[in-house]
Amino acid sequence: MDLNRHGTYALVFSCPASVNAIAGKLGPICLSSGYWIYVGSAFGPGGLRSRLSHHLKPSRRPHWHLDYVKHALRPVEAWTTTDPVKREHDWSRLVSALKGASCPIAGFGATDCSCRSHLIQMTRLPGFSGFKKQARRVIPAHGPLFRYDLTQGPFIA
């Protein structure tokens, strides 16, 4: 898959210990230990490669809510699509509906939309195949979906 293209992504993180932070204008937040999925879209310059690269390295100047907490998170997986339609809102709803999902931080990554949150907490590591099956069932015109293992070293050069 060409990561230079535009698309939608979900980053799956593990959070080994609780994290307290001030997430910009969102204010104080707390991420408890467990798994978290951050959903977004990359339709600007550089496409998916640029956005994922930003989210997977430290930020000197935080811009997105995730920038304020990613230092305490361990990347596990990236799920992507180069579907030309922005799917971040659909994906947020789909991930939120997975068994064991909750959205304890309202507005995270979702200040410009009506979604409850683009950061979803999971009680256990979510399965990509179940998400993929659900996405195709709910959105029949959905483009191909891809999964990347982020635990095996550098993902983006």
Image (tube, grey):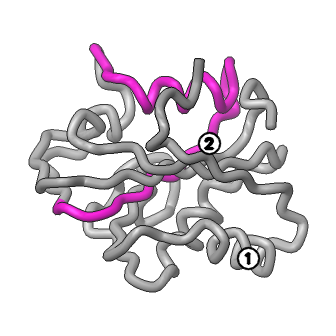
Check the image and report above or below for 126 versus 28.
below
Looking at the rendered structure, the kind of residue marked 2 is Ser
For the C terminus, the quadrant is: top right
Q: Residue furthest front?
A: 152
Q: Is mark 2 on a helix, strand or loop?
A: strand
Q: Are marks 1 and 2 in contact (CB under 8 Å)?
A: no
Looking at the rendered structure, the kind of residue marked 1 is Lys
Q: Which residue lies furthest to the right in this view?
A: 141
Let me know if residue 24 appears in the view: no
Residue 29 locus on image (x, y percent): 16, 52
The residue tagged 2 is 41
Mark 1 or 2, nearer chain start:
2
Question: On the picture, is 85 further left or further right than 134?
Answer: right
Let me know if residue 53 appears in the view: yes
Question: On the picture, is 130 further left or further right than 74?
Answer: right
The residue tagged 1 is 133
Residue 73 locus on image (x, y percent): 28, 44
Give residue 89's quadrant in the image. bottom right
Could you say which is closer to the camera, residue 13 or residue 90?
Answer: 13
Mark 2 closeness class: few <14, some 14–19, many ≥20 residues within 10 Å: many
Q: How far apart are marks 1 and 2 (CA)?
A: 20 Å
Mark 1 closeness class: few <14, some 14–19, many ≥20 residues within 10 Å: few
For the N terminus, the quadrant is: top right
